[in-house]
Image (cartoon, grey):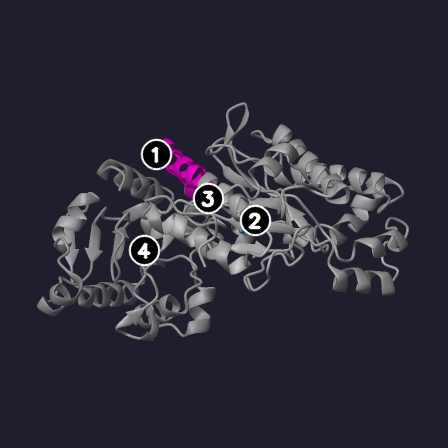
Amino acid sequence: MFTTETYQRRRQNLVQQLETGLILLPGNTDSPFNSVGNCYRFRQDSSFLYFCGLDQSGLVVVLDIDSGREILFGEEQSLDDVIWSGSQPSLRDRAKRIGIIETAPISGLDRLLSASISAGRAVHYLPTCRAENKVTLGHLLGKSLSVVDNDISLVMTMAVVALRSIKGDEEIVELDAAADLGYKLHTTAMGMAREGVFEWQIAGELEGVAARAGRVLSFPPIVATHGEILHNHQHDQQLKKGDLLLVDSGVESCLHYASDHTRTIPVGGKFSSRQRDVYRVVLSAMERAKGLIRPGISYLDVHLAACRILVEGLQSLGLMQGDIDQAITAGAHALFMPHGLGHHLGLDVHDMEDLGEDYVGYDSKIKRSPQFGLSSLRLGRELQEGFVLTVEPGIYFIPKLIEQWKNESRNAEFINYARLNEYLDFGGIRLEDDILVTQDGNRLLGRPIPLQVDEVERRTGEGQPVWS
Ligand code: GLY
Ligand code: MN
Ligand code: MN
């Protein structure tokens, strides 16, 4: 955990941004897998982690903005809990660790909230994507589930987004640590990318790299010889020489900060000339983006600048044509990259997105575009020092999408559909790094993972024989 003062300071910063009422910060509870005695691996709510740091199930913190009271609600362990799960510190000791003096059982939370609601006091709470948390909030606040979503506190949500968006020094240490282990993940995958290996063997090894370091992956790994399937979790293909293998994987630090990297690897150790050409275009787009990231520039502009490099490259390969600005304005390049350039990274891999993607990635100055491709840009707003984000350009050849656009003659003035026929079996290439926005530019988080063509070729297939 961070220092006691860190959690106290974060809560003070939150309270100062709200005028009156109560702030309700529920932690997560264990979620049954197939019986209450067999749950999914516990993952604490990220906002609870940020403000309260305690990594156990069944805790709730209430902050009273008007009186300054802070209360940790939870249950002391029963003898049965100790027998089955081992001892935990008392509620009072856990509260003390994060600088909270008052503790009470969960039944006291019901009473406090009922009395406050009856007295007309505001109860501020955040959006949540977990169904059981919505049910709990509905029960605690006497609201139906649809009203729970509608009544979230916008002012609290915006305050939390503002605080969590700017990473403190202690958080950057964690993000660097996560990205350092990301190096191990991706060099392991490169080492394993040999003919005959199954995608699931690599996916399993990634879980193992994390587990052997006492960590967990920050999201289900994407391991795909069909890199054009943007989030492939199926992992049933056997690698063949000449395939491209896309690996998008990240890991959590001890305090649950995420890494998120992608590399695309030539199975057999050599890119074909066609693969190398496309790879270099994606790499150039990434380098362009990294060259632009600094405080004050909007990520929408960085995205568009990276797309310009993609269009120039695709034109040089004979796959696009025409005026580049017009092609980008029309969104023609989204045929090849239907997603955005990146997203915030922090305690969540898509950081804070359960609070609302648009609250996190956009603001009053920059609104999300509805255009295909741009509509998937998760982060468009102006960058600030302390933001941590991903840069993840790609080029994909998605046969069903190409077929649909071709049948509609969509953007036919910008796309060479005849030449594109030769690429229908290509797959996809994505490259992704994790970046900290600094005072005068940016820096890469973690140990650099092989990225240049010759480095990636050299590392491919050089690992230990694969366990069966
Ligand atoms: N890991 C999914 C992504 O890169 O956003
Ligand atoms: Mn990723
Ligand atoms: Mn990402």
Residue that label 1 marks:
170
Residue that label 4 marks:
25
**Image: magenta residue range:** 164-182
Whole-percent x, y for residue 431 in the image? 61, 42
Does any portion of residue 218 appear in the rendered image?
no
Q: CA distance from mark 4 to mark 2?
A: 44 Å
Crowdedness near tag 3: few (<14), some (14–19) or many (≥20) residues, C-alpha within 10 Å: many
Asked if the residues shown at circle 3 and circle 1 are in contact, with their CB atoms under 8 angstroms apart, the answer is no
Q: CA distance from mark 4 to mark 3?
A: 25 Å
Q: Is residue 184 left or right of residue 334?
A: left
Asked if the residues shown at circle 4 and circle 2 are in contact, with their CB atoms under 8 angstroms apart, the answer is no
Image mark for residue 185: none
Q: Earlier in the sequence, mark 1 or mark 2?
A: 1
Check the image and report above or below for 349 versus 285: below
Q: Residue at x 66, y 51 (%)?
A: 241
Check the image and report above or below for 87 versus 320: below
Q: CA distance from mark 1 to mark 2?
A: 36 Å
